[in-house]
Image (spheres, rainbow, N blue to C red):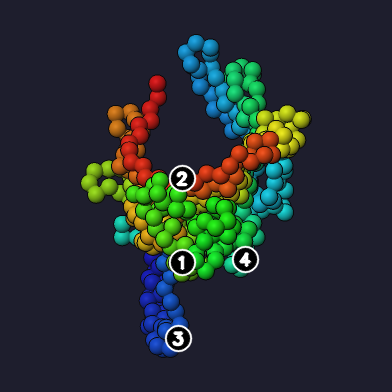
């Protein structure tokens, strides 16, 4: 007990000296310290999964247990094709600048710049390769229906990523997503057909000014990075998720595995240059598809579990999509534009 008292007295006696040391910090030193909030995440990675399998124990109730198996899943950045391979060391994808903050209304997640090598240089989008999709009996009688490659995914806008084209002095499109010379981002034919669509009217009127507005609205001048807000409902339990997300996919390929599984245009369907976006006024996560700022597609929903069902309520989305070309056997059958797509509804998911 005596030794404990000595130790206590010794500890207390050191306190004034510690305080004196703190008093030596001056205003100039403290002025160099800045507070930081939230986190930023940069990644450089590749990923492979040998197999993802789903088994339905009772199948369709007639033919026994069924199985869906997805094999040889690869994620990286090598600009591959169906049947290609991603090197885990040399074909890694960069995602830079993802942010996470706790806001007053929930958790706010800022999208990463896909393909940014941390220096602001776009070095290539993300590739997803699926070697085989197998359907059939869980006892082992499955057959592959083909393989898929999703090439060069990013939220980058510029050379190597999404490109809304070059324009003449009148705002007419010379080349780009809707690659018909002499037409604007959306042609007058589209504006006539979809006259009530904010996307079509605004984009047609804006011409190349829309491109300048997009660049001005994005501080890095290249990436259109959206945000996702995850929050609670104003009353009761449940989760509300609202987001903006711009997407560009260089190409989606499907092959039916003829010719020994080797990529060949003769046995492949290709969908090229898929861009998903909306024309807004620059306000994030707002149900607005009228403006001259190119933004991410908007979506929102509330998630609840009710009476044994996963219920997605108050669903709403606003987006436009352009596809440069759809090719069958290497020959293009045309291009597609889906403009001013506004969807609302409720979805229930449950077992049967």
Task: Sort mark 3 into few (<14), some (14-19) or many (20+) by Cα contacts within 10 Å.
Answer: few
| Position of residue 260 in the picture relative to residue 235 (left or right) | right
Which secondary structure lies at badge 1? helix
Viewer-side label of 2, 3: 2
Q: In the displayed structure, would residue 66 be above or below residue 46?
A: above
Which secondary structure lies at badge 3? helix
Task: Sort mark 2 into few (<14), some (14-19) or many (20+) by Cα contacts within 10 Å.
Answer: few
Viewer-side label of 4, 2: 2
Residue 312 occupies quadrant: top left
* Quadrant of the rendering where the N terminus is positioned: bottom left
As measured in the structure, the alpha-carbon distance from the residue carrying label 2 to the one carrying label 1 is 21 Å
Q: Between residue 147 and residue 103, name the one nearer to us.
A: 147
The residue where tag 1 is placed is 209
Residue 27 occupies quadrant: bottom left
The residue where tag 4 is placed is 121
- Pointer 4 or 2: first along the chain: 4
Viewer-side label of 1, 4: 1
Rendering coords of residue 15 (x, y %) = 38, 79
Residue 121 occupies quadrant: bottom right
Q: Which mark is on residue 29? A: 3
Q: In the displayed structure, would residue 115 be above or below residue 219?
A: above
């Amino acid at each position: 007990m005596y030794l404990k008292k000595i130790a206590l007295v010794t500890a207390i006696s050191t306190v004034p000296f510690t305080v004196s040391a703190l008093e030596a910090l001056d205003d100039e030193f403290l002025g160099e310290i800045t507070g930081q909030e939230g986190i930023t995440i940069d990644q450089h990675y590749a990923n492979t999964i040998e197999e993802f399998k789903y088994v339905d124990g009772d199948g369709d109730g007639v033919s026994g247990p069924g199985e869906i198996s997805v094999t040889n899943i690869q994620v990286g950045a090598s600009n591959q094709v169906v049947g290609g391979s991603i090197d885990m060391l040399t074909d890694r994808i960069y995602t830079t600048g993802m942010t996470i903050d706790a806001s007053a209304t929930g958790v706010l997640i800022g999208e990463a710049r896909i393909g940014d090598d941390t220096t602001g240089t776009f070095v290539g989008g993300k590739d997803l390769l699926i070697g085989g999709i197998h359907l059939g009996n869980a006892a082992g009688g499955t057959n592959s229906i083909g393989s898929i490659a999703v090439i060069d995914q990013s939220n980058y806008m510029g050379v190597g990523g999404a490109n809304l084209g070059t324009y003449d002095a009148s705002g007419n499109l010379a080349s780009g997503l809707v690659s018909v010379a002499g037409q604007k981002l959306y042609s007058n034919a589209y504006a006539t057909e979809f006259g009530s669509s904010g996307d079509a009217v605004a984009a047609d009127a804006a011409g190349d000014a829309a491109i300048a507005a997009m660049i001005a609205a994005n501080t890095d001048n290249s990436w259109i990075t959206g945000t996702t807000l995850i929050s609670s409902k104003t009353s009761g339990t449940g989760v509300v998720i609202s987001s903006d997300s711009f997407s560009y996919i260089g190409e989606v390929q499907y092959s039916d595995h003829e010719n020994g599984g080797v990529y060949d245009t003769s046995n492949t369907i290709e969908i090229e240059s898929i861009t998903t976006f909306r024309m807004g006024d620059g306000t994030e996560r707002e149900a607005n598809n009228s403006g001259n700022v190119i933004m991410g597609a908007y979506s929102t929903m509330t998630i609840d579990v009710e009476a044994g069902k996963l219920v997605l309520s108050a669903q709403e989305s606003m987006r436009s999509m352009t596809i440069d070309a759809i090719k069958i056997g290497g020959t293009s059958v045309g291009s597609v534009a889906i403009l001013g797509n506004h969807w609302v509804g409720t979805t229930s998911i449950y077992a049967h």
